[in-house]
Amino acid sequence: MDAEAAAALADGLKFLAAGLAMVGTFGPGLGIGILAYGAMQGIARNPDTAGTIQLNMILAIAFAEAVAIYALVVAMLILFVG
Amino acid sequence: MESTEQTRPRWRWGTYRWLIILVIVANVFAVKAFSPVKPHIQVPAETIAGPVILPLIGDLYLTNTIIATLIADLILILIAFSIWRATRGGAMILSGVPQIFEMIVEAIYNLTESTARKWADTIFPWVATIILMVLLINWSELIPGVDSIGMLHEPHHGAPAYDTQELFAIGDFSVTTITGEIETESAGESESHDSEVQHVGSGLGFTPYVRVASTDLNFTLALALTSVIVIQILGFRAVGIKYLKKYLNFGRLGKLLFREKIGPFDLIFPFTDIFVGLLELIAEIAKMISFSFRLFGNIFAGSVLLFIIGTLVPVVIQSGFVFLELFVGLVQAMVFGMLVMVFMTMATIAHDSH
């Protein structure tokens, strides 16, 4: 095929690849939900320690969210650098 | 238009409502007059000044993220200077900007002390510096002018060329705005072209003067590298040479080879210990990567989001995204600092061996 159609096909595949890379955010989303569930249960059982539980929950959520950010960085690299 | 839902006191519209409505209307007119142009987003930072060639290291460019880091440094030094001046007279109660920073520093110190009890005085300066600097840099993407005020120049290869219009001129210096993007004629990448395909005289490239430093992987990687190296140094300071036992755990292997009485489990535990030590070493490298990419990914994605939303819906909805970025910047700074603090604390605790 000629050069223009090949370039358009490459662009389309690039967008498809970026969208597919974002499928990797299912896991961290689920993980953050489970974390918050545990934290809510902990606060419900013991409201005095709500501050400590909240602090540790935010720390653990940052770890889980980092994996989602890796997927986002891969998608951005495909879109803007690839 | 006064609501009567509450009985006491009655809720009234504030006095600033006209100012806010005026700002929104002015925003709509400004968007109609100069509509936003699709931004050019690239991962590496754009260079402002040419290379300084050093003998061993190579080329050093002045990028716009270096300018942003220097500005953040200057602001922090000025804040420290103002607090020094305020406490010089021996006053017990501060007021104004030093008071706000006293609250912030006290909050961070309480956090550090609750996690690292004995080593809080050593860990606290690192943690506080990282939190304050990353917070300042993350919040700089909300200031109007960052990423949008810059210089126009000959378009670079691969970067889009813009159509410009001069707003006003102060003497010799002209303030120009970008009104549209010029589509270049070459289809596809122009590596095969020998001649430059450009409109002569029309179309200039744009480089912002200041870009958010956390969107540059150099900055986040430098912070992560420094933090991980300091964590190791702190581990050596706290425990001594026995800190290496965390990574090279040959204790039980020695027991297997040289002692005479060995139990049934002593055959496999030494090898699992060595494997776990190797995993800890790999985890240190993973810490470097995860620190840098967490901050970079969050703030880069946030700034791309602000660009795109500012282009699509520039009127009222973008304020919601600015609030989101405020929150995300704060959380990422706190998380970076807290993770460094937790890892430093874990490094100072002696690794218990069986």
Image (cartoon, coloured by chain):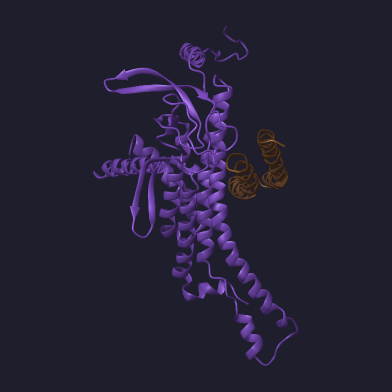
- In terms of depth relative to the viewer, which is nearer, B206 or A44? B206
Q: Picture coordinates of residue B91 (x, y %)?
A: 28, 42
| Residue found at x 57% / y 48% | B294
> Which color has been applied to chain A in this rendered view?
brown
Q: Picture coordinates of residue B37 (x, y %)?
A: 52, 24
| Left or right of residue B151: residue B193 | right
Extreme residue toward the right, this view:
B264
| Left or right of residue B177: residue B246 | right
Q: Picture coordinates of residue A10 (x, y %)?
A: 67, 39
Question: Looking at the picture, does residue B179 appear above or below residue B60?
Answer: above
Chain letter for the part of the structure drawn in purple:
B
Q: Picture coordinates of residue B180 (x, y %)?
A: 50, 22
- In terms of depth relative to the viewer, which is nearer, B294 or A47? B294
| Residue found at x 33% / y 42% | B74
Extreme residue toward the bottom, this view:
B260
Residue B67 position by quadrant = top left
Extreme residue toward the front, this view:
B194
- In terms of depth relative to the viewer, which is nearer, B129 or B31? B31
Quadrant occupied by the N terminus of chain B: top right
Extreme residue toward the left, this view:
B89
| Residue B308 in sight | yes
- In terms of depth relative to the viewer, which is nearer, B86 or B300? B300
Quadrant occupied by the C terminus of chain B: bottom right
Question: Looking at the picture, does residue B38 appear above or below residue B122?
Answer: above
